[in-house]
Image (spheres, rainbow, N blue to C red):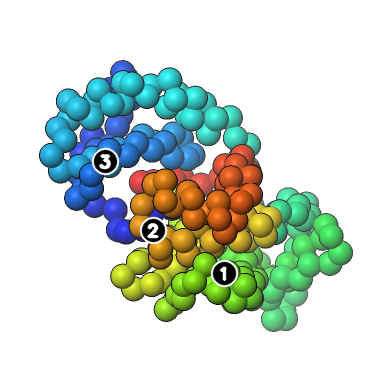
Amino acid sequence: MSTEPRPAGHFIRVGGLRVEVVRKDIKNLHLGVYPPSGRVRVAAPLTVDDEAVRLAVVGKLGWIKRQRARFQGQPRQSQRRMLSGESHYFMGRRYRLRVIEQAVSPGIVLRGKAAMFLTARPGSSVEQRERLLLAFYRQQLKSLVPELLQKWQPVIGVQVAAWGIKRMKTKWGTCNIEARRIWLNLELAKKPVQCLEYILVHELVHLLERRHNERFRSLMDQFMPQWRVHRDELKDSMLAQEHWTY
């Protein structure tokens, strides 16, 4: 979860790995491995040269390979065709899709704990049906977030100026500290509600601490002691079948 726009970087090769290097006005070097394919990225202080970055990556090659193997082993949904019988997820629960083609107002309704009915115009395309599903996800998240903000903002002692939902391919959430604005990934609609809550708390805590440092982790421990459980649940959850770019 990033707290600022990502600057442009360049790439180096280390032990057969393609590593992105981004230089920023920071004190310490930060190394990350990102889903779904295990992209390796290093945020380095302005004064640290590529050779120092290369040595740091070499020292972490074992950890990097373990992270990449875990990402590659995660289950992925097959390409969605938006047809009856497909499985779709909402709030961590699996639903069987049933498509009803009628010349009425299109939309999605959940019935019971396992049925998702999608009403679409006759002859509607995959893209049109998918837009209905995404609109449903967006609507549901927008109804959940205000209550969670009311719960957590007084606890953490912060107040956001604005928040929104958007599709993001590399982050579950972002926080613009200066604008006090939070964005949440639309994909969170598919995950258990506790995962949505964790990401929201994570971004709210960034209003107190910009970096993922010891103070940040201490604040997370204070406000949400079980946050690591939810983080791991997100890491291990099924990934959408998308062409992720960075």
Whole-angstrom CA distance, mark 1 to mark 2, is 15 Å
- Percent x, y of residue 108: 72, 70
Q: Are marks 1 and 2 in contact (CB under 8 Å)?
A: no
Nearer to us in this view, 82 or 112? 112
Nearer to us in this view, 222 or 179? 222
Q: Which residue position holds label 1?
A: 155
Q: Which residue position holds label 2?
A: 209
Number of residue marks: 3
Q: Are marks 3 and 1 in contact (CB under 8 Å)?
A: no
**Residue at image coords 59%, 76%:** 150
Q: Quadrant of residue 136?
A: bottom right
**Residue at image coords 36%, 57%:** 210
Q: Secondary structure at mark 3?
A: loop
Whole-angstrom CA distance, mark 3 to mark 1, is 30 Å
Label whose residue precedes the other's in the sequence (2 or 3): 3
Q: Quadrant of residue 138?
A: bottom right
**Residue at image coords 32%, 59%:** 4
- Percent x, y of residue 51: 17, 25
- Percent x, y of residue 64: 42, 27
Q: Secondary structure at mark 1?
A: helix
Callout 3 amino acid: Asn
Label whose residue precedes the other's in the sequence (3 or 1): 3
Whole-angstrom CA distance, mark 2 to mark 3, is 15 Å
Picture layout, residue 59 above or below residue 9 = above
Residue at the far right: name it.
112
Nearer to us in this view, 217 or 112? 217
Q: Which residue position holds label 3?
A: 28
Callout 2 amino acid: Glu
- Percent x, y of residue 153: 53, 72
